């Protein structure tokens, strides 16, 4: 059965790129079902208002709970009995970090929905209420602030969907990637293709040797070297300041 993806947003056009390339093909071939919902469809005033000023004061606006409540009610009804507590991903800079392990876990679910916030975020009560009905996961793309959840959702969707069997042509290409093995979390070694000599730069000769053992050892060394230099935290060491 197809994996079902839902996104609730005030900017549905943000999800159009999912119609391109490998993910687009997966949607066309029926491997993936994609449903994008406009939050403003769940407003009832003439201005289709989704935000209001924050209680307690401060700058910025907060997303009102009522449209979110109705949108999530409709989503639950639409999902039917696919899953007991469907996954609801809420991108937020105050979430736990989104990782390859999280992507792999999400890929094992039959459906997942993304609640994309804007402004200063969504009224907290929406997520507290939703926690009773959904498996709510507040996830951060990284330690920086975006304007909205849409770009974060796109990145997460891409990371999840490429793990769904059939989406990527050659499943072997998933195996050796950076982060793909939790017990051996090394960054990927450098890669080269033809020509062997380009602008005076040569491909490392070992890669032309045809000796798979030596190639494997060379790649493992490069992986370790790059990981030590760029991400010592992956090796259990404190990151360089
Ligand atoms: N005031 C909020 C804070 O500091 O946590 C930032 C709100 S941000 C301007 C608006 C929305 O962008 C957030 O509700 C969230 O959906 C999304 N967003 C921003 N940075 C993100 C990140 N690093 N990861 C995931 N989502 C992010």
Image (tube, rainbow, N blue to C red):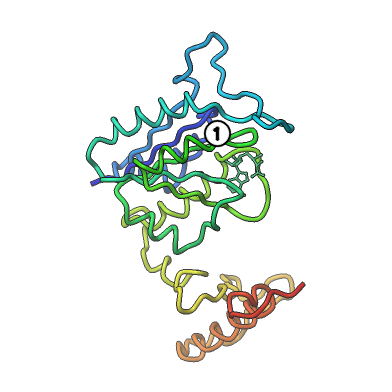
Q: In this view, does 56 lie to the left or right of 132?
A: right
In terms of depth relative to the viewer, which is nearer, 59 or 42? 59
Residue 220 x, y percent position in the rendering: 54, 84
Name the quadrant containing residue 62.
Answer: top right
Residue at figure coordinates x 46%, y 48% from the top left: 157
Q: Is residue 230 left or right of residue 47?
A: right
Residue 111 x, y percent position in the rendering: 33, 45
Question: Does the beta carbon of the residue at mark 1 sit less than 8 Å from ligand 1?
Answer: no
Position of the C terminus by quadrant: bottom right
Residue 214 x, y percent position in the rendering: 51, 91
**How many badges with numbers are in the image?**
1
Return the residue at label 1.
Answer: 123
Q: In this view, does 169 lie above or below 178?
A: above
Residue at figure coordinates x 49%, y 34% from the top left: 16
Residue at figure coordinates x 38%, y 68% from the top left: 172
Give the SS element for disc 1: loop
Q: How crowded is mark 1: few (under 14 residues within 10 Å), some or many (20 or more)?
A: some
Find the residue positioned furthest to the front: 56
Residue at figure coordinates x 60%, y 82% from the top left: 222
Residue 206 x, y percent position in the rendering: 57, 87
Name the quadrant containing residue 86.
Answer: top left
Q: In this view, does 189 lie to the left or right of 35?
A: right
Q: Which of the four quarters of the rendered structure image does ligand 1 lie in?
A: top right
In terms of depth relative to the viewer, which is nearer, 47 or 22? 47
Find the residue positioned furthest to the right: 241
């Amino acid at each position: 059965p197809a994996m079902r993806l839902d996104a609730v947003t005030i900017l549905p056009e943000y999800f159009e790129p999912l119609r391109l390339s490998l993910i687009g093909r997966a949607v066309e071939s029926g491997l993936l079902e994609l449903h994008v919902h406009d939050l403003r469809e769940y407003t009832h005033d003439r201005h289709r208002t989704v935000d209001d000023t924050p209680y307690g004061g401060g700058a910025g606006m907060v997303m009102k709970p009522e449209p979110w409540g109705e949108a999530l009610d409709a989503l639950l009804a639409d999902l039917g009995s696919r899953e007991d507590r469907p996954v609801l991903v809420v991108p937020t800079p105050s979430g736990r970090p989104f990782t390859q392990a999280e992507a792999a876990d999400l890929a094992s679910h039959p459906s997942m929905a993304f609640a994309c916030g804007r402004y200063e975020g969504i009224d907290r009560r929406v997520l507290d209420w939703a926690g009773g009905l959904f498996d709510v996961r507040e996830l951060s793309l990284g330690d920086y602030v975006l304007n909205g959840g849409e770009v974060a959702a796109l990145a997460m969707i891409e990371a999840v969907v490429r793990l769904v069997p059939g989406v990527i042509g050659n499943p072997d290409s998933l195996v050796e990637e950076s982060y793909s093995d939790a017990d051996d979390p090394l960054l990927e070694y450098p890669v080269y293709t033809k020509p062997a000599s380009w602008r005076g730069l040569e491909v490392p000769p070992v890669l032309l040797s045809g000796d798979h053992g030596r190639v494997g050892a060379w790649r493992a060394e490069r992986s370790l070297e790059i990981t030590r230099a760029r991400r010592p935290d992956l090796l259990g060491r404190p990151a360089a300041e």
